[in-house]
Image: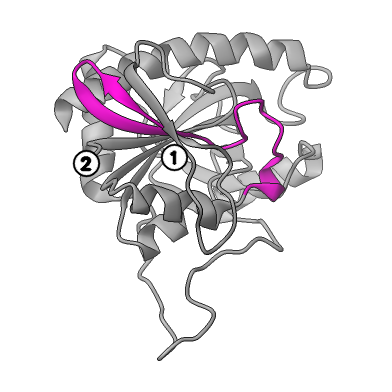
């Protein structure tokens, strides 16, 4: 049984240092996951990895089969999911290249399949989603950030937008008024689906740009790519510390 499932987002298509690798194609009642599951050991600990956008990074955020992905990880008997996400920052204290552990989120997406509880029900099912990230895993992840001597920022609201386009400056101002600190495109319905299947779930967000209108000029992809590289080096260190904490 894997100690940890890792969902890799932009910039994390594979796990450095993974040993004893084997891949497994999983068929689910909800269609195909984004990628085969990659099993292996990291620092002697068994993990399972799924590339959210596919191994070629070809699946846009609004077309990710979130239900298939989360179902596949439950089928793999994963009890904990660490979701890696590249995000923009709306908060001057959360600079590009930094790793953030969000504690809340707001969902602005539409048209996505957001629940397992919609067909052939004995009764309507509601989950408590007051705190969208699992308290235990959130705390362990926060401790891992401290262990590797990175600044700990674990009070942040993640606003999840539809994508795949980036937001307008006016939309970002609306998100700021709503209380968002970060903006990304994949945080929902992923977190809610994990809660429905009773899988512990936390997010490790890497800031890769200032959100629209908060810096001079347009958002440039080569700047994002540079910050992805910087941030993912930090994420790899945090993952290793997290495994020890688990």
The magenta segment:
38-64
Residue 179 or residue 198, whichever sits in front: 198
In three-dimensional space, the C-alpha distance between marks 2 and 1, rounded to whole angstroms, equals 31 Å
The image position of residue 232, as x and y in percent, is: 48, 15
- Is 138 positioned to the left or the right of 212 in the image? left
Query: In the figure, residue 46 lies in which quadrant?
Result: top left
Viewer-proximal residue among 163 and 90: 163
Q: Is residue 100 above or below residue 131?
A: above
Q: Is residue 24 above or below residue 131?
A: above
Marks 2/1 in contact by CB < 8 Å: the verdict is no
Please state which of residues 44 and 86 is positioned toward the viewer in this rendering: 44
Label ID, residue 1: 2
Q: Which mark is residue 180?
A: none
Across and down, in percent, residue 45 comes to 20, 24
The residue at 27%/22% (across/down) is 41
Verify whether residue 45 appears in magenta: yes
Crowding at dot 1, Cα within 10 Å, few <14 / some 14-19 / many 20+, comes out as some
Extreme left residue here? 245
For mark 1, give the secondary structure.
loop
């Amino acid at each position: 049984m894997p100690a940890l499932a890792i969902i890799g987002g932009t910039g994390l298509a594979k796990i450095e240092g993974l040993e004893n690798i084997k891949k497994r194609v999983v068929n689910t009642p909800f269609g195909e996951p984004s990628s085969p599951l990659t099993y292996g050991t990291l620092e002697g600990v068994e993990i399972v990895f799924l590339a959210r956008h596919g191994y070629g990074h070809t699946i846009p955020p609004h077309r990710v089969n979130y239900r298939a992905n989360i179902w596949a990880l439950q089928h793999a008997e994963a009890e904990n999911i660490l979701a890696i996400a590249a995000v923009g920052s709306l908060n001057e204290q959360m600079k590009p290249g930094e790793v953030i552990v969000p504690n809340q989120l707001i969902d602005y997406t539409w048209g996505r399949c957001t629940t397992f509880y919609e067909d052939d029900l004995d009764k309507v099912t509601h989950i408590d989603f007051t705190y969208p990230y699992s308290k235990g895993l959130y705390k362990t992840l926060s401790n891992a950030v401290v262990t590797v001597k990175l600044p700990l920022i674990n009070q942040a609201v993640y606003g999840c937008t539809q994508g795949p386009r980036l937001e307008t400056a006016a939309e970002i101002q609306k998100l700021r008024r709503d209380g968002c600190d970060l903006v990304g495109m994949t945080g929902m319905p992923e977190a809610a689906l994990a809660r429905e299947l009773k899988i512990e779930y936390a997010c490790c967000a890497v800031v890769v740009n200032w959100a629209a209108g908060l810096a001079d000029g347009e958002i440039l992809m080569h700047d994002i790519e540079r910050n992805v590289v910087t941030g993912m080096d930090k994420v790899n260190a945090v993952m290793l510390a997290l495994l020890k904490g688990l």
